Each structure stands twice: as C-alpha cells, then as structure tokens.
Image (cartoon, rainbow, N blue to C red):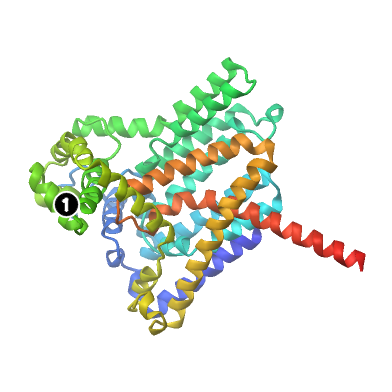
C-alpha cells in the first residue's frame, strides 16, 4: 500500500514541478482550464463559498442552477478559494490516494495483501488518473466516492464467506457513499439498482434468509438515494422539475442522440447537433449549457429536451447502436497525451509524427498505450481465472461484472466521440482483475523457479 501512495504522490509532485516550470499561471487561474465544464464547476463553487448562492452567474443576481450536481463544485470551489487552481489539483491527488487505499483494502479482503498492493500500484500508475488529477473535473471525486461506497457495501452483500458477513450497519455508509457519488456525477444514478439486481439474483440462487436479505436491500436502497433524493426535491422546489440534473437531457439529446445522427449522416458531432436543433426546434447546444448567459429559462429548456428525447434517440436506432460500438473501444484505447501537451504549453503532433514530439510526451504516450494493453489483457484473464479458481468470490465477481457492464453502457451513451476520461469509472475493476492475474502469474513463475533450483 505504501508503494502505491508513494508512486501517486511522487508523480503528482513531478507534474506539479513540471507544470509550474512551464505554465505557472495554470496552477493559479482556473479559467485557463482546457475543458469549459471545469470553469463552470468552479464559478458555481466559488459563488457557494463567497456569496452563499448555488449559481454560475459571475455577478448578481445569482440565479439558482441545476445543471451540475453539488458535490464536486462545492469541494473544488472551497479548494480554489484556499489555494487557487493548485488547491483543486491537490484535492484530486488526495482523493486519488484514498482510492488507492480503498482498492487495496477491497482486494486484500477478497484475495490477499499482495494482490491488493499490485492493484493499488496499477491505479497509481494510470496516466488517465495523472491527467485528471490536474483538471478541475468531477471524474476523480466520482470514482473515489463510488469506491468508498463499494468498500462498505460489497463485503456485506457479497461476503467472501457467507457465514462471516460483515455487519449490516456497513450498508449505511456504503449507501451514503454511493449517494454522494451520484451527487458528484449523475452517471452513478442507477448504480445502486445494478448492485441490488445482482444481490436479488444471488438470493434466488443461494440459501439466504429472505427476510434478512430484504432488510439488507431496503437499508442499502434508502441510504443510496437519500442525499440524491433530497437534491431532486430541491430542484422540484426551485424549478418545478423532480430531476437530478439539467445536464442529463442535454447529454441524451445532443451527445447520445448526436452520436447516432453523426453516424447516420457521416458528419461531425457539431453538424449532427445542428440537424437535431433545426428538426426539433430546440435551443442550440451552447444555449442549453449556458441558459442564464442567454437569458433563457433552464427549466423550460429541460422540458423541451425531455419532450423530444425519445424521438431523437430512436429515429436512427441502428446508428445509435453503431455510435455506442464506436465510442466504447475508442474510449478504452484513447490516451491523454494531448492534455499533457496543453498543460505544458506544447504542441502534440500526434502518433503519425511521434518522434517530432518532446521526449516527455513520447514517454507518456508509450506508457499510456503499454499500460492499457497490460491492464485490459490482464483484466480479461483475471476475471476468467478468478471465476473458475475462486469459488468463494463468484458472487462478488458477478456483481463486479454487472458494475463493469453498467459503466461500459455509460461509455456507449457518450456517443461516437467518447473520450478517454469516460472510461475512468471502469478502470478500478479492470485493474483489480489485472492485478489478480499478474500476481498469479508471478507466483507460478516463482514456484517454478524455486522448483528448478531445488532439483539442481
């Protein structure tokens, strides 16, 4: 475990020094963020801390917002108020360190400490984690709270030994952890349902007391949606819409639907979005994302998008499936070298002119590709091997596969232009099973080596 934390902190410090030397202003001013979403997160968060208003407006009147859920803006806004943009990056690194710890503890419980150490080190070595640590985006916070929720939940609902299950009280922090994750990133809204479905299947096929299982499921369900439910009620009170986020329908219409139309007409995403806008008489994607700036009512925009969402998505169903099938592998193999180039004020020449780039960018690219090959291949081998070798883990593996399938689906919903960061929630699962495979391979090689030396 200490090796993983050392690696994570060492790479974090190295990146701080590198960026500080070549792009010092980036560590001070959040408005230099490469992703415009990061700017609106921090605009909102600063207004919470400085003016007590959940609003993205730069000046009064601070009209309320419901596009973003509150957890990351509040955390990042506080960090920015204390230390500037660098404070947000420190926050992300600390959250990543907590993720390393949780991964280690979970794998230690189900497998052993050695596999846990390898899994946490692999997470610390992921260049995607490095790049997102230095962006004011909600991805790292989301993954950390999901892992925290799973740490308390999985051993209780899917224990290694049925007669030695952890106490039911763990489902309270487990559910709350997932509820906080939902408020960090709405992607997690249906994750508790997936876990409960896996638990229901387990109950059907195992000798478990139905009354006790129902009590466990109800406890988990209530606490998983407690905080998210309160936020949805706040949105209903403020905007008249019982919804988690105004961003949901924007994504479904202009990105999931946009990906389908993009595939159908073989055009760019922006051209597909223009087609959707004209055909359904909608505000543009830019207006939907910044309703206040254009003097529009965000609640009314949400209603318009919701009304046409089904028609947009189902107009070209085959292209919708094709778009998802393009986006998923694209996200799995994508690298973040271009982000590192932006952060260090360099031009990324692409893979066709790989040797024309700086040595650091070449090294990052090569390691990114190598890392993905290792963990994806190792993850597939690990999950198959674990299923047949570790009977005690089968229900935990089944639930992990369900969670992985859910996150793969969310990647597909991002459309044909799905990028690297959308795979982050999937990575801990892949990494865990890759660590199990690598540990098993190491033990076999070690045993054979010792046996050959003994025979000599």
Residue plotted at (45% across, 26% down): 222
- The image quarter containing residue 313 is top left
As drawn, is 267 to the left or to the right of 112?
left
Residue plotted at (34% across, 53% down): 327
Q: Residue furthest top?
A: 211
Task: Identify the element where label 1 is drawn.
Answer: helix
Q: Quadrant of the N terminus?
A: bottom right
- The image quarter containing residue 442 is bottom right
> On screen, 86 above or below 315?
below
Identify residue for label 1.
Answer: 273
Q: Residues within 10 Å of mark 1 (few under 14, many from 20)?
A: many
The image shows residue 43 at horizontal and vertical percentages of: 26, 55
Residue plotted at (58% across, 16% down): 210
The image shows residue 223 at horizontal and vertical percentages of: 46, 29
As drawn, is 444 to the left or to the right of 79?
right
Q: Is residue 361 visible?
A: yes
As drawn, is 402 to the left or to the right of 289?
right
The image shows residue 379 at horizontal and vertical percentages of: 56, 52
Q: Is residue 53 visible?
A: no
The image shows residue 85 at horizontal and vertical percentages of: 36, 64
Q: Residue furthest bottom?
A: 356
> On screen, 391 above or below 416?
above
As drawn, is 12 to the left or to the right of 353?
right
> On screen, 272 above or below 456?
above
Observer-nearest of 225 and 422: 422
């Amino acid at each position: 475990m200490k090796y993983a934390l050392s690696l994570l902190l060492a790479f974090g410090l190295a990146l701080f020094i590198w960026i500080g030397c070549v792009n010092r202003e980036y560590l001070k001013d959040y408005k230099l963020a490469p992703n415009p979403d990061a700017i609106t997160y921090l605009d909102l968060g600063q207004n919470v801390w400085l003016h007590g208003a959940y609003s993205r407006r730069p000046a009064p009147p601070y009209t309320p917002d419901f596009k973003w859920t509150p957890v990351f803006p509040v955390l990042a806004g506080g960090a920015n108020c204390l230390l500037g943009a660098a404070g947000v990056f420190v926050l992300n690194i600390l959250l990543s360190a907590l993720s390393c710890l949780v991964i280690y503890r979970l794998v230690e419980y189900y497998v052993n400490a050695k596999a846990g150490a390898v899994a946490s080190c692999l997470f610390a070595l992921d260049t995607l984690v490095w790049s997102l640590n230095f962006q004011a985006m909600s991805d790292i916070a989301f993954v950390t709270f999901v892992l925290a929720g799973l740490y308390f939940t999985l051993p209780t609902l899917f224990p290694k030994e049925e007669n030695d299950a952890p106490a039911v009280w763990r489902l309270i922090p487990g559910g709350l952890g997932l509820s906080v994750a939902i408020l960090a990133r709405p992607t997690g809204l249906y994750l508790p349902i997936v876990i409960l479905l896996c638990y229901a299947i387990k109950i059907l096929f195992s000798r478990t007391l139905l009354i006790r299982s129902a009590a466990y499921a109800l406890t988990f369900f209530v606490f998983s949606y407690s905080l998210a439910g309160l936020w949805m009620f706040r949105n209903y009170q403020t905007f008249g819409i019982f919804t988690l986020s105004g961003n949901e329908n924007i994504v479904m219409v202009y990105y999931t639907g946009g990906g389908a139309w993009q595939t159908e007409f073989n055009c760019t995403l922006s051209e597909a979005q223009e087609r959707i806008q004209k055909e359904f008489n909608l505000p543009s994607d830019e207006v939907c994302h910044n309703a206040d700036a254009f003097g529009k009512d965000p609640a009314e925009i949400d209603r318009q998008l919701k009304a046409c969402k089904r028609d947009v998505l189902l107009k070209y169903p085959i292209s919708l499936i094709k778009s998802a099938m393009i986006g998923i592998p694209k996200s799995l193999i994508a690298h973040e070298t271009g982000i590192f180039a932006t952060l260090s004020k360099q031009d990324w020449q692409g893979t066709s002119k790989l040797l024309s780039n700086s040595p650091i960018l070449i090294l990052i690219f090569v390691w990114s590709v190598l890392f993905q090959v290792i963990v994806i291949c190792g993850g597939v081998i690990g999950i198959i091997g674990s299923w047949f070798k570790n009977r005690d883990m089968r229900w935990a593996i089944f639930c992990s596969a369900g969670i992985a399938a859910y996150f793969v689906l969310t990647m597909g919903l991002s459309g044909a232009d799905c990028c690297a960061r959308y795979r982050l929630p999937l990575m801990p699962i892949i990494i865990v099973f890759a660590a199990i495979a690598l540990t098993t391979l190491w033990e076999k090689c070690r045993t054979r080596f010792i046996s050959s030396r003994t025979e000599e």
